[in-house]
Amino acid sequence: MEIIVINEPESRCLELFRMALSESTHDARTAAIAVMKHEVVSLGLDSFPIGAGKTSGGKNSPEFVQWVAETSRERYEAAHEFSAIARRYETRNERKLNIAEEVGKRVWDSIQAQEFKGLHVAGGILEKVRKIAKQEGIQGARDKDVLSRTWVTYRGVVHLGMAMDYCEDNPGKGLKVLDVAEQIRQGLSQGFPKKTGKSYVSDSDQISFLFISNI
């Protein structure tokens, strides 16, 4: 299992990390996560422009100025990578991730209800998602083989988007997205369909987000 440390500024930009997770391989996702970390830094630099301290009676520290200069090339390259990731996300990857998250939500509901439904069995979770996709005309989820491949591709990373949706739908509960995501991640890796000994999602396929405050 890959563990990604998230700091305070990054925790306020989780939609960027969900975009990174929409890449189709583990290596591509970890590379995209690194790009998103640079993007968060670039967004933050808008609040601390070089020389801004002069107008407010202060000044930037020499260490900060040096760090900005030394990492400017990395941020420039990351900006180009970000554009490519965003294009893939908008043209195809977001749709695939949305579909996988819908499957994940139904798996999670089955776990919470202690039903532990199978994915591939007749009347199982994938079949139900297919029926809904046909009714609503959702591309990429109406063919059972395509749907199965999409789930396999993204099952290790669906928990972040699922948690974001849950917290958005339950704003009054004071929930923290990363805490909910970790709860879902553990549930998917520890629960398994009836009559099987294999979990819904192997933890070796998963990416876990660990929040560490920098305050």
Image (tube, rainbow, N blue to C red):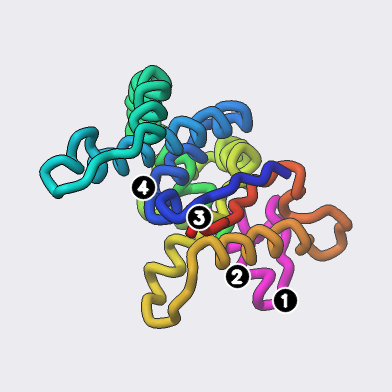
Tag nearer the camera, 3 or 4: 3
Task: Name the residue tied to disc 1.
Answer: 114
Q: Residues within 10 Å of mark 2 (few under 14, many from 20)?
A: some
Q: Real-space Cα distance between discs 2 and 4?
A: 23 Å
Q: Real-space Cα distance between discs 4 and 1?
A: 30 Å
Q: Real-space Cα distance between discs 1 and 2?
A: 9 Å
Q: Residues within 10 Å of mark 4 (few under 14, many from 20)?
A: few
Q: Is residue 31 visible?
A: yes
What kind of residue is marked 1?
Answer: Gln
Q: Farthest bottom residue?
A: 172
Q: Real-space Cα distance between discs 3 and 1?
A: 39 Å
What kind of residue is marked 2?
Answer: Asp
Magenta segment: 106-129
Q: Secondary structure beneath disc 3?
A: loop
Task: Name the residue tied to disc 4.
Answer: 137
Residue 2 position in % (x across, y down): 68, 42
What kind of residue is marked 4?
Answer: Gly
Q: Are marks 1 and 2 in contact (CB under 8 Å)?
A: no
In the picture, the disc for residue 214 is 3
Q: Are marks 4 and 1 in contact (CB under 8 Å)?
A: no
Task: Name the residue tied to disc 2.
Answer: 109
Camera-side residue of 167 and 98:
167
Tag nearer the camera, 4 or 1: 1
Q: Is residue 84 visible?
A: no
Q: Residue shown at 41%/29% (left/top)?
A: 67
Q: Real-space Cα distance between discs 2 and 3?
A: 35 Å
- Marks 1 and 2, the one that precedes in the sequence: 2
- Marks 4 and 1, the one that precedes in the sequence: 1
Q: Residue shown at 43%/36% (left/top)?
A: 36
Residue 93 position in % (x across, y down): 43, 35
- Marks 3 and 4, the one that precedes in the sequence: 4
